[in-house]
Amino acid sequence: MDTIIDEIRDRDPEQHEFHQAVQEVVESVKPVLDRNIEYRQQAILRRITEPERVLMFRVPWMDDDGQVQVNRGFRVEMNSALGPYKGGLRFHASVNLGIIKFLAFEQVFKNSLTTLSMGGGKGGSDFDPKGKSDNEVMRFCQSFMSELYRHIGPNTDVPAGDIGVGAREIGYLFGMYKRLKNEFTGVLTGKSLAWGGSLIRPEATGYGAVYFAAEMLHTRGDSLENKGCLVSGSGNVAQFTTEKIIQLGGRVLTLSDSSGYIFDEQGIDRKKLDYVKELKNIRRGRISEYAEQYPSAVYTPVNPTLDHNPLWGHKADCGFPSATQNEINGVDAQHLVDNGVRLICEGANMPTTPDAVDIFLDHRICYAPGKAANAGGVAVSGLEMAQNSMRLSWPRKEVDDRLKQIMKSIHRTCLEAAEEYGNPGNYVAGANIAGFVKVVHAMLDQGLV
Ligand code: GLU
């Protein structure tokens, strides 16, 4: 196993996030490999860590000043053993092949856990939507899709949103796909309700993460009632995580963006959350404005000289990292533990560094990794695909009930797998093992392809 990790490092030395994601899964599934010699004979680890296909393409577009801009587009089609490739598109300046590969790799196991029939993929671009006009975003999306369209399809590869890709971008991408293919199909999820989207899809990742947290607490005879919660981020996941925590009686104390964070000791209530939604989704403003609007809140700008994020230094019962990868490091984890945190539930993908994960596990914190806790988003994407295939749409309650059932089932599956392989209560081991075993069975059934 060490050889595999060394090989992956040697082959693509700069893909640090991908190495990190692989290392975590490989460590977790060691007991599975020990019990199944066939997995080793069939070189399952080598095969599962190598994408089935990697697409990288030029995305030229013209800005509002008439200047030509060039970005790089990616789609990593990681594994199709369980269904069409499925996973979001991320538009962010930090995007590179290593980031997309880590996200695609995580997606394979996450999608496997949802119980729905979806393979794993991920894509995106280093295009930075911040400060761009609607027209610039539209031209970029059209150029991006004018290459991507030939590689995707409702039975091949079904992209969706991720950081920097929301309803607006999905609309422009869908429009271009439809024009090029002359086909109105469910090729993207996260569509607007009026033209093929699913109810609850916008809410699904955040709601699902909170359902997962509630389930972790429930099995321990506890609930989110009156719990102080630290939420990072202020995008789609953070907003609907906050909404569900409020509905379940918890108190959300923080939100953030890439410039800094706000701490509101009185808690973010429904009215304040509506303000955040309008600020971020319509005005596309910065979270600092929250503190100007609500004097109970303090805004702290990012300080690049710090070795930790002060957001995680506040005393709270629960943490919901919902911004981006590696946003909780070992120092942050120690602060959280010292302040008595009881639960960490990841709305973002891989927000916790490996040393921080060890701190949570050593202190027996209820720790839910993203590939289990944030699977509600892609699960409802799977339900959107099902509705599109039937050309009908389910009522809000039906989708929400299915989401709740799926999150409960993922929770149970993680605990059972962790128990079966000698790591009771460890959701990291449970999620990785359960996600892995299902994909591997399908790969073995389908032969050496
Ligand atoms: N980007 C989301 C994720 O990380 C959703 C993907 C999807 O809906 O396909 O799971």
Image (spheres, helix red, strand yellow):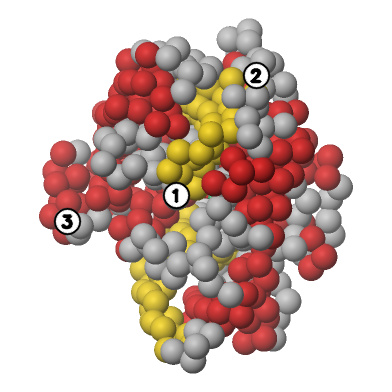
Q: Quickly name the residue at label 1.
A: 259
Q: Secondary structure at mark 2?
A: loop
Left or right: 12 as drawn, with respect to 224? left
Q: Is residue 434 visible?
A: no
Left or right: 152 as drawn, with respect to 52? right
Residue projecting furthest to the top: 221
Q: Quickly name the residue at label 3.
A: 13
What amino acid type is highlighted by mark number 1? Ser
In the rendering, at what x and y percent does residue 3 appear?
Answer: 14, 43
**Disc 2 or disc 1, which is closer to the eye?**
1
**Nearest to the observer: residue 381 or residue 358:** 358
Is residue 356 shown above or below 422? Answer: below
Compute the Cα span from label 3 to label 1.
30 Å
Q: Earlier in the sequence, mark 3 or mark 1?
A: 3
Quadrant assignment, res 240: top right
In the rendering, at what x and y percent does residue 265 appear?
Answer: 59, 24
Is residue 99 shown above or below 132? Answer: above
**Nearest to the observer: residue 383 or residue 19:** 19
Could you classify mark 2 by the number of other residues whose Cα lies within 10 Å: few (under 14), some (14-19), or many (20 or more)?
many
Q: Quickly name the residue at label 2.
A: 224
Compute the Cα span from label 2 to label 3.
42 Å
Q: Residue at x 38, y 75 (%)?
A: 72
Q: Secondary structure at mark 1?
A: loop
Compute the Cα span from label 2 to label 1.
29 Å
